[in-house]
Amino acid sequence: MNTDSKKFKAFLVSQKPYGGFQHEITERYISDLPDGEVLIRVHYSSLNYKDGLSSTGNKAVTHNYPHIPGIDAAGIVASSTTEEWKAGDQVVVTGFDLGMNTSGGFGEYIRVPAKWVVKLPQGLTLKHSMIYGTAGFTAGLSVAALIHENIRPDAGPIAVTGATGGVGSVTIAILSKLGYEAIAVSSKESAQAFLRKIGAASIIPRNEVEDAGAKILLTPRFSAAVDTVGGRVLATIIKSLKYGGTVTTCGMVNGGDLPLTVFPFILRGVKLIGIDSVELPMEYRLPVWEKLGTEWRPDNIDSLAHEISLEELPDAIGKILHGEMEGRAVVSLL
Ligand SMILES: NC(=O)c1ccc[n+]([C@@H]2O[C@H](COP(=O)([O-])OP(=O)(O)OC[C@H]3O[C@@H](n4cnc5c(N)ncnc54)[C@H](OP(=O)(O)O)[C@@H]3O)[C@@H](O)[C@H]2O)c1
């Protein structure tokens, strides 16, 4: 069946004629989608910080408008020109160019290259896969990096920064599920109950790890850390790691600079590991998705997210851009 003339609903961002950007819920044709091997009827997407940037005209993320953002999508294959995928398959797409310069998951359909597509991992529903989404997958990569560095559950306190955010909250839930002592670092006084519920062993305010002093090392405090915010917070965490500690870095909402000396690395043997969820080759993605569906799946996975509609996106985008989000927002396109 030729679906090209079929219309679908989408959250479309466009450039205003005299400057600025606007968004609307509108209809697009399947033929408006880019070429690709797999056409997917999206059931769920999710909201990530990068979607906030794309939805408000950030040209470092999205060069050309009009554009449908959404770096995550989970749904059912509608048609495929490859043998790898067939109509009816339940699939997940995160990262690569989806939602950046390829029409994304804030529309009822996406069309993508077959090599971006992952089979829905065992143990997860389509909605669960989007409770994770890119943020949760990045949390999984961060935990995998700590395990690879032999950081064990009895290691001691593991700091998680940006704790109420998408990556931070899922990281806490996974670490807690695996028996680690997750220390939530958060700016939100009001989020104590949420952070305890998802598994934080204790909570410290962000300003305790936002050191502006000139000391090259601070009192050793954490055995390891998952940093999601960068900047001065990451620098403070690195200076506060115990001997041989490891920290992962994935984000920069606190800043892209790292005000630091080499001393934590050469005097305490500290390791800093970069996490990228976007271009990561498929062979490394699949084992992490498998863990996210099985051993690492938090018992309270549903409490990590709330569901919103396309119509509720503008409010949620404002919140994520202002660092006000608590947990994950799953976008339903059903
Ligand atoms: N490398 C990758 O592949 C990858 C993948 C996913 C995300 N990321 C990046 O990782 C970062 C976090 O993503 P996310 O999805 O978790 O975003 P998010 O849901 O917006 O969460 C970010 C959290 O950081 C804290 N925060 C906000 N502004 C801050 C500031 N100025 N200084 C310090 N902390 C601040 C807030 O938590 P509290 O109020 O609890 O402190 C906020 O909830 C973003 O920069 C994102 O682009 C990278």
Image (cartoon, rainbow, N blue to C red):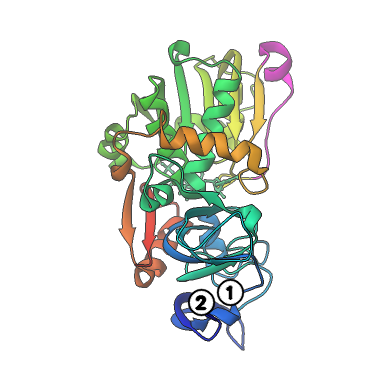
Left or right of residue 11, residue 287 in this image = right
Residue 100: quarter of image: bottom right
Q: Where residue 290 sits: x, y (%)?
A: 49, 36
Element under disc 2: strand
Q: Where residue 265 sits: x, y (%)?
A: 70, 19
The quadrant in which the C terminus is found is bottom left
Q: Nearer the viewer, residue 240 or 48?
A: 48
Q: Residue at x 50, y 30 (%)?
A: 209
Residue 176 bears which disc, if any?
A: none
Q: Where residue 127 sits: x, y (%)?
A: 37, 52
The reply to whether residue 230 is in sight is no
Q: Nearer the viewer, residue 232 or 129?
A: 129
Classify 16 as above or below 183. below
Is residue 169 in the magenta section?
no
Q: Neighbour class for label 1 at 10 Å: few (<14), some, many (≥20)?
A: many
Going by the picture, which residue comes out furthest to the bottom? 17
Residue 19: quarter of image: bottom right
Residue position marked by numbered label 1 in the rendering: 67
- Part of the protein shown in magenta: 256-269
Residue position marked by numbered label 2 in the rendering: 12
Q: Residue at x 66, y 72 (%)?
A: 35
Q: Nearer the viewer, residue 6 or 271?
A: 6
N-terminal-most mark, 1 or 2 = 2
Under mark 2, the amino acid is Leu
State yes or no: discs 1 and 2 in contact (Cβ < 8 Å): yes
Is residue 266 in the magenta section?
yes
Under mark 1, the amino acid is His
Q: Nearer the viewer, residue 297 or 158?
A: 297
Q: Where residue 242 sits: x, y (%)?
A: 56, 13
The reply to whether residue 94 is in sight is yes
Q: Neighbour class for label 2 at 10 Å: few (<14), some, many (≥20)?
A: many
